Amino acid sequence: MAEDAILGFLQSNDEIADSHEFAASVGVGHTELENVIKSLKGFEIVDSKEITKDRWVLTDEGKSYAANGSPEVQFFLAIPPEGISRADLKVKLGAEIFEIGSKAAAKNKWVGFDKDLVTKKVGSVKDDTKDLLKRIDGGEAVVDKVINDLKRRKLITKYTWRGYSLRKGPKYVLKRKKAATDLTREHLQRGDWKDLEFKEYNLDAQVQPIQIGYMHPLLEVREAIQNIFLQMGFEEMPTNNFVESSFWNFDALFQPQQHPARDSHDTFFLKVPATTRQLPEDYVDKVKRVHEFGGYGSKGYGYDWKRDEAEKNLLRTHTTAVSTRMLYKLAQQRLFSPKRYYSIDRVFRNEAVDRTHLAEFHQIEGLICDRGLTLGDLLGVLEDFFSRLGMSKLRFKPAYNPYTEPSMEIFSYHDGLKKWVEVGNSGMFRPEMLLPMGLPEDVNVIAWGLSLERPTMILYGIDNIRDLFGPKVDFEIIKRSPMCRLGL
Ligand code: FB9
């Protein structure tokens, strides 16, 4: 019906100027016409251009005044010749009309107020407002001053009217062959496919979003950083033990037993099993001695080292505990062989939770164990590692760790954030840590660490760590935020 009307009209007319008027003229709803227009346009049978027209329409208040008269005229007409009290007038008109009408009627100097009495000051009035509202409602154009006045009184509002102008399209036909979107077996069997018009594939059509799984951002970045380590010839350390003994987490790292990080304010100690069952006895003695008396050129800490303190179980505070186990194991080898190890896994610290800190995070650690390694080697491998993370401009700030000397905090200039960001910590493991293990004198170990959460937050533009990790993770962030490619 609508289609034939359009195609029929265009056969003898160049254009349908206004789809609304045309719809009215052929007695179909504009929406129905709109759908036909879209379909004909899809088949290039017609060309349509969207046209918009703004017009003023009455608000509900405007409609009520156009129907019942403006409040100022209602106010005026409600005053009997002898006048009337405000209160009675208010009852008569209702609060709203009374409020608006009194002000406007007074402004027009139609009425007078003497104390509580309201009287007419003119014989009769004309309801221009009502007339204007009716004219505007009729689609008549009125001067801007009137429009602004009525707009200010919220009696009219702008309505943007959207319609189309139509012309013949490149594939205009008077009667469209039946449209088909799919060639089906039935078409082939019936052979009527020849008389069918097949719709062009709309390659820009939006597709149904497909529900697929998404990698959690932390795992995306973990994988990318893991690939960097593997490309640099590192092998992963086994980190499948969140529970560790104080011995491997602290003592073997030459971290003294009274070090502040070793009290329950910073570390989660286990109630059950509270202590570890087995430690390598001979090695424990060496660790005890180096803490108490030093050796290997060190004077040690000179305190009374307690076995039971070292046996306390805890949630590891760093994956450096795993590095310690791996280096000890390496030292047990009959022949020393250089090693490059990395770990990326959870560590636990009893810290105040805030926007960037939770009680657990993922630590990334890299270490190289080889003969004659120097601080220069450490600087070099850090340049290499961070450049692969897209961070080329590095600065190093001397720092302190109980288990490395010298130690350095690593800073990178982040172009996006336009500032130097602390991107990690590093150092050379102390001889007091390495030699009791039995590693050869000339073997040094350079190591560094950073978190997985910080780079992930920066790369995904996530401001609060709770959006990334834990019960409040916002899956939408995961779905919609593509990871900006690391410098790979
Ligand atoms: O990750 C950290 N910062 C960082 C890293 C990458 C990054 O990438 C962006 C894409 C550009 C951005 C930021 N930090 C280490 C620095 C700070 O965030 C720091 O405030 C918080 N640190 C954690 C510890 O917090 C108590 C991050 C975590 C950290 C710190 C040190 C180590 C590991 C993790 C270490 C070590 C180490 C040292 C010597 C030998 C062996 C291991």
Image (spheres, grey):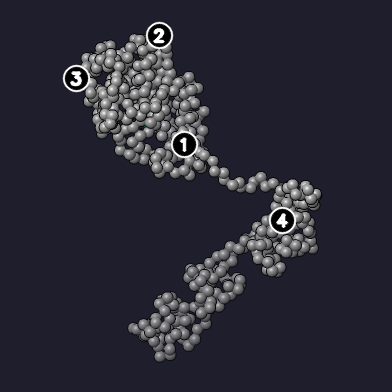
Question: Picture coordinates of residue 308 (x, y %)?
Answer: 23, 23
Crowd band around label 3 with a 10 angstrom C-alpha radius: few (<14), some (14–19), many (20+): few
Question: Picture coordinates of residue 229 (x, y %)?
Answer: 46, 23
**Real-space Cα distance between discs 1 and 3?**
46 Å
- The amino acid sitting under disc 2 is Leu
Quadrant occupied by the N terminus: bottom right
- The amino acid sitting under disc 4 is Leu
Kindly identify which residue carries mark 3: 304
Kindly identify which residue carries mark 2: 335
Kindly identify which residue carries mark 1: 217
Above or below for 126 versus 292: below
Q: Does dot 1 land on a helix, a strand or a loop?
A: helix
Kindly identify which residue carries mark 4: 40
Which mark is first along the chain, 2 or 4? 4
**Real-space Cα distance between discs 4 and 2?**
82 Å
Question: Picture coordinates of residue 47 (x, y %)?
Answer: 72, 55
- The amino acid sitting under disc 1 is Pro
Which of the numbered marks, if any, corresponds to residue 190?
Answer: none
Which mark is first along the chain, 3 or 4? 4
Crowd band around label 1 with a 10 angstrom C-alpha radius: few (<14), some (14–19), many (20+): many
Which mark is first along the chain, 3 or 2? 3
Are the residues at dot 2 and dot 1 in contact (C-beta closer than 8 Å)? Answer: no
Are the residues at dot 4 and dot 2 in contact (C-beta closer than 8 Å)? Answer: no
From the image, state whether disc 2 or disc 1 is nearer to you: 2
Q: Does dot 2 land on a helix, a strand or a loop?
A: loop
Q: Is residue 415 visible?
A: no
Count of marks placed on residues: 4
Above or below for 179 versus 450: below
Q: Quadrant of residue 239?
A: top left
